Image (cartoon, rainbow, N blue to C red):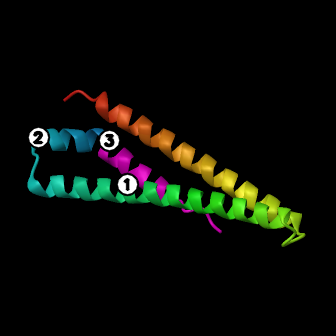
Amino acid sequence: MAIDISALNALNVMNTINSPAMVSGASKAAGADDGQSTISAFSDILKSFMSVYSTANADQTAAVQLQQTYALGGTNNILDVIAAQQQAYASLNYASQVTNAALGAYNQIMNMQF
């Protein structure tokens, strides 16, 4: 199972929103179009974050299920169990890093002075 990296693209959108050109343009003229595109971009960012968390949850659930199957003697392939655990760990670590980056972007936006 591959890790969904669409949240990284969402963070690039946050950098674009946070750019000086975007901020100065927003402060000069706040049209309805700009508001709608910002809301749409924010919605896309939230969907990406939710995708990251659902992937991490699915990986964790799969790892626990495989551990239980191994413990009950349903399978004797320990390598699959270890791989599932590592995938769950990587997904959780990735979700944590995305959260930290999002909080950093939020803090930057809150510290802006118009």
Question: Mark 2 or 3, which is nearer the eye?
Answer: 3
Residue at coordinates 47% horizontally, 61% vertically from top-left?
51
**Front residue (pair 57, 113):** 57
Disc 3 residue crowd, few under 14, some 14–19, many 20+, Cα 10 Å: some
Q: Which residue is mark 1?
A: 46
**Front residue (pair 50, 71):** 71
Residue 75 percent coordinates (x, y): 86, 72
Residue at coordinates 51% horizontally, 60% vertically from top-left?
54
Question: Mark 2 or 1, which is nearer the eye?
Answer: 1
Q: Secondary structure at mark 2?
A: helix
> Left or right: 4 with respect to 40?
right
| Quadrant placement of the N terminus | bottom right
Segment tinted magenta in the rendering: 1-17
Q: How would you classify the magenta stretch by its main secondary structure? A: helix
Q: Which residue is mark 3?
A: 18
Residue 5 is one of the magenta-drawn residues: yes
Residue 9 visible in this rendered orientation of the protein: no
> Left or right: 76 with respect to 8?
right
Q: The disc labelled 1 sits on which kind of residue? A: Leu
Residue 9 percent coordinates (x, y): 45, 56
Q: The disc labelled 3 sits on which kind of residue? A: Asn
